[in-house]
Every structure is written in C-alpha cells, then in structure tokens.
Amino acid sequence: MKWKGSLLSVLLAALLLVGIAPGVTAMEEWCEDDPPVVITTPGGASVPVYVTSGALGVEHLPAVQLAQISYTVKPVQGGQATQVTMHVLIQNDVFGSNYQTRSTVSVLPWGTGTVYASTGGHAGQTMDMTFQLGVG
C-alpha cells in the first residue's frame, strides 16, 4: 500500500507542473495584426503592402490593432523608384508601458513574400522602417 502514496505524490507533482507551465508561457506569446496599407508613390502609383505589427503579451492585442501607421515617400533614381519611410506607433495600454513591439513591411500578409523592412521597439515609441519600391 506504500506505493499508492508514492504514486499519488508523483501524480500530484506532475499536475502542479502542468498547471504552472501554461501560465508562464502565455505571457511570452506575441500578438499580431496585419493590415494592408496602400502606398501612393510620387508618380501616382498605388502599391499595396502589409504591415505586420505585434507586441509581446497577448493582453496587448487591442493596442496592436489600434496601431497608428503612416508613411512618407520621396522619389529616388531620377523618379524611377520611391523611398518609403513607414512609421508605426503602438501605444502604451492599461496592461503596461514600454513593452516590446515589432513591425515588418512585406508584399504578402503576415511577413511573407518579399520583406521590405523589419524593426523592433517598445510601446509608446514610433518604429521607423525605410525601404525602396521599384516604382516611381
């Protein structure tokens, strides 16, 4: 009958470890949003890109979804191409400030296809990414 007590102790310890682990990893997950942004070049061309932005901690998803995204453009290579600077600001929220953020500009959704630029930062600070489009 001694083995039943030992088995029960081992099972209880295993359950406690399993119960703790999800709570620890949940705070380390990134949440992301991926809106399309249509860039208008100086020559009037419309170029769609995707801006995948995220924050460390799923509780920050509303702040990520409300990220302020803007851009500036200027012609380069005699008007044959466009230099774009993308500005992404994820605000601090009720769950914290200065938490880690990141952003990627790509041709296809979720940072796939050609990646034009990528950066990391912190909430409350603008992340800037500069890249070139082959369209004037």
Image (cartoon, rainbow, N blue to C red):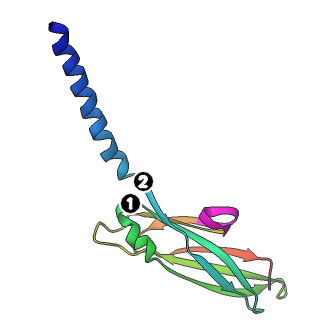
Q: Position of residue 88 (x, y in %)?
A: 52, 76
- Residue drawn at (56%, 74%) of the image: 35
* Left or right relative to 103: residue 3: left
- Residue drawn at (46%, 77%) of the image: 67
Using the rendered view, name the quadrant where residue 112 is placed: bottom right
Q: Foreground: 19 or 53?
A: 19
Q: Position of residue 18 (x, y in %)?
A: 31, 35
* Left or right relative to 5: residue 80: right
Q: What residue is shown with label 2?
A: 29
- Residue drawn at (46%, 65%) of the image: 101
Q: Position of residue 127 (x, y in %)?
A: 52, 73
Q: Is residue 114 above or below residue 70?
A: above
Image quadrant occupied by the N terminus = top left
The reply to whether discs 1 and 2 touch (Cβ–Cβ < 8 Å) is yes
Which stretch did the figure color magenta? 107-118
Would you call the spot at circle 1 few (<14 residues within 10 Å), some (14-19), or many (20 or more)? some
Q: Foreground: 126 or 22?
A: 22
- Per the image, label 1 sits on a secondary structure element best described as helix
Sooner in the amino-acid sequence: mark 1 or mark 2: 2
- Per the image, label 2 sits on a secondary structure element best described as loop
Q: What residue is shown with label 1?
A: 58
